[in-house]
């Protein structure tokens, strides 16, 4: 793609003119001295004290953070996204909300993969986590600068951050300001997103924004009370107490995931006809959506109580129409027919329970590692599913050879940090104790044949539409049943036609793949 013409330096106005030559030179330098002394400091680290660290100091280890964060993971597909971004332009890491714990998690994972570190993080001081000599040198340089030049200038209002990014400095920004008292005292009207867009207008290099999410718990978000939000944080952003409790419980679920880079030059070209204010707003909304997509691939959509799903399905016009029609044709009271429909839906629906999913994960690991030498999923196949989860609702249509098929597929999804699907199963498997077990890992049950049925197909179609609309992956077998010979059975199109109907009734910005 041809590069858009860059604006002149005069476009940045007096803010850019306030930046000194020393600032511009330090922003353009990327190499950081490996050993820091009292007499020699990198100017960026000395001034803003917010760079990521290759080596953590004693506070990081004595506080127990090093021990608590040791189980964090950053998978190869995320590392590859960061490598691709660094090869294509200037890297800007974008986290959702300002959080020291999330920042430390990202710093630790970048170190483990030897990936580029951010030399500036907006809104955080990181000196306390440096080694002893480096921290003293940083504080001494900051004190000397304050005594000589006065209070530290704001990197946003002076235009320093914009110049630094334009000069090629790797930085870390946050899409959302935290809901704290200190955040309310920050400079109003000056937005890091403005600096990011202004840097791209002046830079000849592409700026690659890498959306990064730190997922501490794979269970989908649930609505919290006001007291729970105060103690544990919001549903979308758990507080530091909950994060440390999760990693301290020896959980292997905590993961740092980096999404596909966002090219800011291409974004500006798409928004060329908009005003700068609208460009900033659109860029923030887009980046927040990219962050949400990365979370969605692992945790899935927000869970709702079954009673909410039940009420939505039973009160839908399609179900109410079939209840009235069935009552007229059979001569039974509408209340009796309504009760029959409720029992039908209760017997059909899944009740996914993530504590039970975790238990099933341990059981399947013991089972499959003893039955098979190994269970592999090609990276390109996992990436296809991940891309489908990012863009909407994936529909999994495997062949059916064994009753282990649906268990194995869900387990492999879980092992690859993908949200497990809801699985369409025959009602012959709904018996106790297997039925309750399958319901809690995402199974829902249908009749083998809809022939002669007037009520069941309508209720099932409405329930399936609700799952797809909410964004839950769906798995069903096109053959209808299990093949006893190993050959493919003739396709049965009942569920497929319902999936196509449901796909035509969801939001236009969501795909069914």
Image: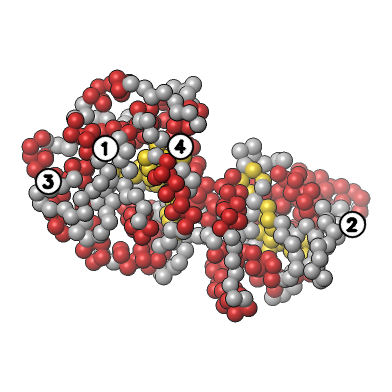
Q: Which residue is mark 4?
A: 263
Quadrant location of residue 119? top left
| Residue 252 percent across, percent down from the top left | 45, 66
Q: Which residue is mark 3?
A: 141
Q: Is residue 370 left or right of residue 99?
A: right
Picture disc at residue 28: 1
Judge depth for marks 1 and 3 and give the one in front.
1
Comparing 77 with 416, the one in front is 77
Quadrant location of residue 151? top left
User: Mark 4 and mark 1 in contact (Cβ < 8 Å)?
Assistant: no
- Using a 10 Å C-alpha cutoff, classify the residue at mark 1 as few (fewer than 14 neighbours), some (14 to 19) or many (20 or more): some
How many numbered discs, if any? 4
Q: Which residue is mark 2?
A: 451
Looking at the picture, does residue 404 appear above or below residue 7?
below
Comparing 246 with 384, the one in front is 384
Q: Is residue 98 left or right of residue 456?
A: left
Q: Is residue 368 visible?
A: yes
Spatial CA distance of label 3 from label 4 is 36 Å
Q: Mark 1 vs mark 3: which is more N-terminal?
A: 1
Residue drawn 11% across and 40% down?
145
Residue drawn 64% across and 58% down?
421
Picture disc at residue 46: none
| Residue 258 percent across, percent down from the top left | 45, 50
| Residue 144 percent across, percent down from the top left | 8, 43
| Residue 331 percent across, percent down from the top left | 91, 53
Residue drawn 23% across and 57% down?
129
Looking at the picture, does residue 218 appear above or below residue 375?
above
Q: Mark 3 vs mark 4: which is more N-terminal?
A: 3
Q: Is residue 429 left or right of residue 163?
A: right
């Amino acid at each position: 793609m041809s590069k858009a013409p860059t604006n002149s330096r005069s476009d940045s106005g007096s803010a850019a003119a306030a930046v000194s030559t020393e600032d511009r030179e330090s922003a353009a330098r990327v190499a950081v001295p490996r050993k820091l002394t009292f007499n020699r400091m990198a100017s960026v680290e000395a001034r803003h004290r917010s760079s990521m660290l290759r080596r953590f100091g004693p506070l990081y280890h004595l506080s127990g953070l090093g021990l608590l964060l040791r189980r964090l993971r950053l998978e190869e597909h995320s590392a590859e996204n960061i490598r691709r971004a660094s090869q294509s332009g200037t890297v800007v890491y974008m986290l959702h909300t300002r959080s020291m714990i999330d920042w430390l998690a990202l710093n630790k994972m970048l170190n483990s993969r030897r990936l580029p570190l951010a030399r500036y993080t907006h809104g955080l001081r990181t000196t306390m986590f440096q080694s002893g000599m480096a921290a003293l040198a940083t504080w001494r340089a900051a004190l000397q600068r304050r005594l000589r030049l006065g209070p530290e200038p704001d990197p946003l209002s002076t235009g320093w951050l914009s110049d630094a990014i334009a000069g090629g400095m790797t930085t870390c920004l946050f899409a959302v300001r935290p809901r704290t008292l200190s955040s309310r005292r920050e400079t109003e009207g000056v937005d890091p997103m403005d600096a990011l867009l202004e840097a791209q207008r002046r830079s000849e290099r592409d700026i690659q924004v890498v959306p990064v999410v730190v997922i501490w718990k794979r269970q989908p978000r649930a609505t919290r009370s006001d007291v729970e939000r105060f103690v544990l944080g919001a549903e979308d952003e758990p507080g530091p107490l909950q994060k440390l409790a999760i990693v301290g419980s020896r959980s292997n679920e905590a993961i740092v995931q980096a999404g596909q880079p966002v090219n800011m030059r291409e974004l500006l070209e798409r928004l060329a006809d908009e005003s700068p204010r609208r460009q900033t707003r659109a860029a923030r909304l887009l980046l927040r959506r990219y962050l949400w997509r990365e979370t969605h691939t692992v945790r899935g959509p927000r869970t709702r109580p079954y009673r909410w799903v039940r009420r939505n399905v039973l009160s839908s016009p399609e179900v109410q129409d079939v209840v009235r029609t069935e009552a007229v044709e059979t001569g039974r009271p509408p209340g009796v027919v309504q009760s029959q429909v409720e029992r039908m839906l209760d017997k059909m629906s899944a009740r996914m329970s993530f504590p039970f999913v975790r238990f099933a994960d341990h059981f399947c690991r013991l089972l499959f590692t003893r039955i098979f030498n190994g269970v592999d999923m090609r990276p390109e196949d996992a990436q296809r599913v991940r891309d489908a989860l990012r863009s909407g609702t994936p529909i999994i249509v495997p062949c059916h050879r064994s009753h282990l098929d649906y268990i194995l597929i869900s387990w492999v999804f879980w092992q690859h940090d993908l949200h497990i699907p809801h699985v369409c199963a025959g009602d012959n498997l709904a018996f106790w104790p297997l039925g309750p077990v399958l319901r809690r890992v995402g199974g829902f049950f249908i009749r083998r044949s809809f022939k002669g049925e007037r009520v069941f197909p309508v209720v099932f179609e409405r329930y399936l539409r609700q799952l797809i609309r909410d964004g839950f992956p769906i798995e069903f077998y096109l053959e209808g049943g299990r093949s006893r010979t190993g050959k493919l059975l003739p396709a049965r199109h009942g569920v497929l036609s319902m999936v196509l109907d449901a796909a035509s009734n969801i939001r236009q910005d969501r795909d069914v793949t």
